Image: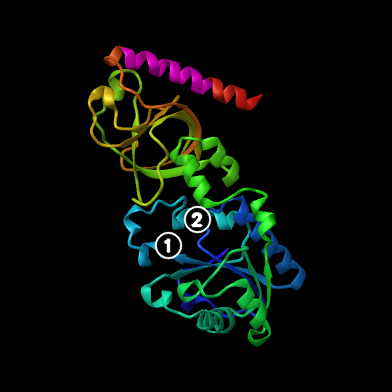
Amino acid sequence: MNIYHSLDSFHRLECAVVTSGTFDGLHIGHKKILKRLKEISVQSGGESVVLTYWPHPRMVVSEDSQDLQLLSTIDEKIELFAEMGIQHFVIIPFTRAFSELSSDDFIRQILVDKIGTKKLVIGYDHRFGRNREGSFEFLQKNANNYGFEVEEIPRQDIEDLAISSSRIRQSLLSGNVEEAQDLLGRPYAITGIIVKGKQLGRTIGFPTANIQLHESYKLIPANGVYVINAYYEGKSYKGMLNIGVRPTVDGTSRTIEANLFDFDKEIYGEDLRVEILHYLRPEQKFNGLDALIEQLKIDKENALAFFTKEKM
């Protein structure tokens, strides 16, 4: 996949088959659009092009941008689109000036002049340009003037899947990671650097890797204990994850701590990727460390039982 971090580095194509959007999470509704994009590319002898925007538009134009929680970082998007077999991935820097482009200017300056669009594929409620004034109806009405065709993925096709990024966020924020996985088509994952904590875990037989996320906007699921797969240096490790404030030891700040089974390396300063597979229980305050240790033993048994069940 060719990756472009600005329009300046993109060379106009003879037959570009294009879609655009923020694609947060790249869930299975998005994948339906991308599947159609690839089909048309093959049929027309063209090349598939995805336009996305970074930073996320809400980070630039919304007053509540500090509260924004996203399902995917830009690096995760690049990896996911590459797996989908997209040929060209264009990241357009989103600025206030860009947000003021009219839909007509966006179409003429970017889709036609810069990209070389011959077919545009969009989701059913996709809009673009200043104040979201560009719609499917606008495109259909003016397609001949722009020299390309437009196809909309019908509302029913996507709504039948009952998918939206907001629903996935709600699932994760309530701890329902299995529902989120069904809607994403893959486990929800977080990646961060391992930092030193209080190192209490190793003294009670459950050493943890404290994960500090690279991006503050990345959504963290609800507090609780989860079953995970962790990835380090190309290998997968089963484990548990605690998200919360560690009330038993009088914690005050929210942390993300992974206990990896059959893993004894010190990896401070290195990245760890974690797929969150199953919610075990809410975080709770125990009557001392002994009670916490007994519960952690039960948690580990339940986590291993989950993996055993998954293999059946």
Q: Which residue lies furthest to the bottom in this view?
A: 145
Q: In this view, does 245 lie above or below 303?
A: below
| Quarter of the figure with residue 281 | top left
Image coords of residue 94 (percent x, y): 41, 70
Which residue appears at 36% of the width and 66% of the height?
60
For the residue labelled by badge 1, is the local secondary structure a helix, a strand or a loop? Answer: loop
Left or right, 174 with respect to 250, comes to right
Label 1 crowd bin: few (<14), some (14–19), many (20+), radius 10 Å: many
**Which badge, 2 or 1, comes first in the chain's sequence?**
2
Is 237 magenta? The answer is no
Q: Label 2: state its secondary structure.
A: loop
Amino acid tagged 2: Asp
Q: Verify whether residue 294 appears in magenta.
A: yes
- Give residue 6's position: percent from left, percent from top: 45, 73
- Dot 2 corresponds to which residue? 24
Whether residue 233 is visible: no
Q: In this view, does 146 lie to the left or right of 69?
A: right
Q: Residue shown at 46%/52% (left/top)?
A: 72
Q: Position of residue 279 (x, y in %)?
A: 48, 30
Which residue is label 1 attached to?
A: 56
Please identify the quadrant where the C terminus is shown: top right
Between 284 and 225, which is closer to the camera in this rendering?
A: 284
User: Is the stretch drawn in magenta largely helix, strand or loop?
Assistant: helix
Whole-angstrom CA distance, mark 2 to mark 1, is 9 Å
Q: Which residue lies furthest to the right in this view?
A: 43
Q: Give the range drawn in magenta.
A: 291-304
Q: What residue type is labelled 1?
A: His
